[in-house]
Image: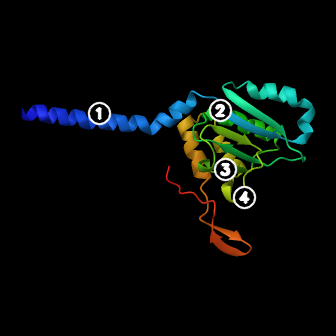
Amino acid sequence: MKYLYLFIYALFILNTALINLSFAKESCLEESKSKVKVEAWLSKRYAKDYRDIRKEFLVIGNTKLGLFIYPAENPSRVVAIGRCIPAYVAQFFIKKAIKYSLGTTHLVNQKLISSNWLGMGAPIFGANSMSKITSEQLAILMDDSLDTESFQKIYRYFTVQNKKINIYGLLLDNPRFLSTDH
């Protein structure tokens, strides 16, 4: 009888652990079934090639694309990648950002955006929500050998926000600061 109780207890613990593990990754698994929402802002010099560029962007598949022409010459050089975006999709759109939005100099913290959203050249982010990246850091993200988990881990490492920011010469709390617990 003692062994039966021990067996049931062990089975209960194992079942609880497996359920908790499945919930940990379930959100991205559910997101992977839906299309990646892409918002891309292009330099105005590419307005005449809009249709061809749209076709080029849709080659990747499984995306819902919003393609916009920036009203000024140069769109923002920011890329925002949601936490459930596969590495190959993110790298594809970073390459397109380099080609059509004049490069990438900033990345956006993932807690500010939807997990299944990718923004390229989007002018909606303030300076306090972005992190400046170097060309070396960008090269690390563009490594084809990265799997999605590694890519996302590196992306989060590069987009850690500062707790304090300089506003009008004063060092104040960052109003956009989000905790770094992932």
* Callout 4 touching callout 2 (CB < 8 Å): no
Q: Locate residue 46 relative to residue 179 in the image: left or right.
A: right
Separation of marks 1 and 3 at Cα, in angstroms: 38 Å
Whether residue 75 is situated above or below residue 9 in the rendered picture: below
The residue labelled by disc 2 is 36
Write down the residue under mark 4: 127
Q: Are marks 3 and 2 in contact (CB under 8 Å)?
A: no
- Name the image quarter holding residue 63: top right
Q: Nearer the viewer, residue 99 or 12?
A: 12
Instruction: Please give the label number shown on residue 15.
Output: 1
Amino acid at dot 1: Asn
Instruction: Measure how far apart labels 2 and 1 are at the Cα level.
Output: 33 Å
Q: Residues within 10 Å of mark 3 (few under 14, many from 20)?
A: many
Could you tell me how far apart the alpha carbons at marks 4 and 2 are, in whole angstroms? 25 Å
Considering only order in the chain, which callout, 2 or 4, is on the residue closer to the N terminus? 2
- Looking at the rendered structure, the secondary structure element under dot 4 is helix
Place residue 164 in its image quadrant.
bottom right
Q: Regarding mark 1 in the picture, which secondary structure is present there?
A: helix
Question: Which numbered marker is on residue 91?
Answer: none
Tell me: residue 141, above or below residue 88.
below
In the image, residue 33 lies at what x, y percent?
57, 27
**Residue 91 x, y percent position in the rendering:** 67, 36
Of mark 4 and mark 3, the one earlier in the sequence is: 3
**Residue 90 drawn at (x, y percent):** 66, 36
Q: Residue at x 72, y 39 (%)?
A: 94
Q: Amino acid at mark 4?
A: Ala
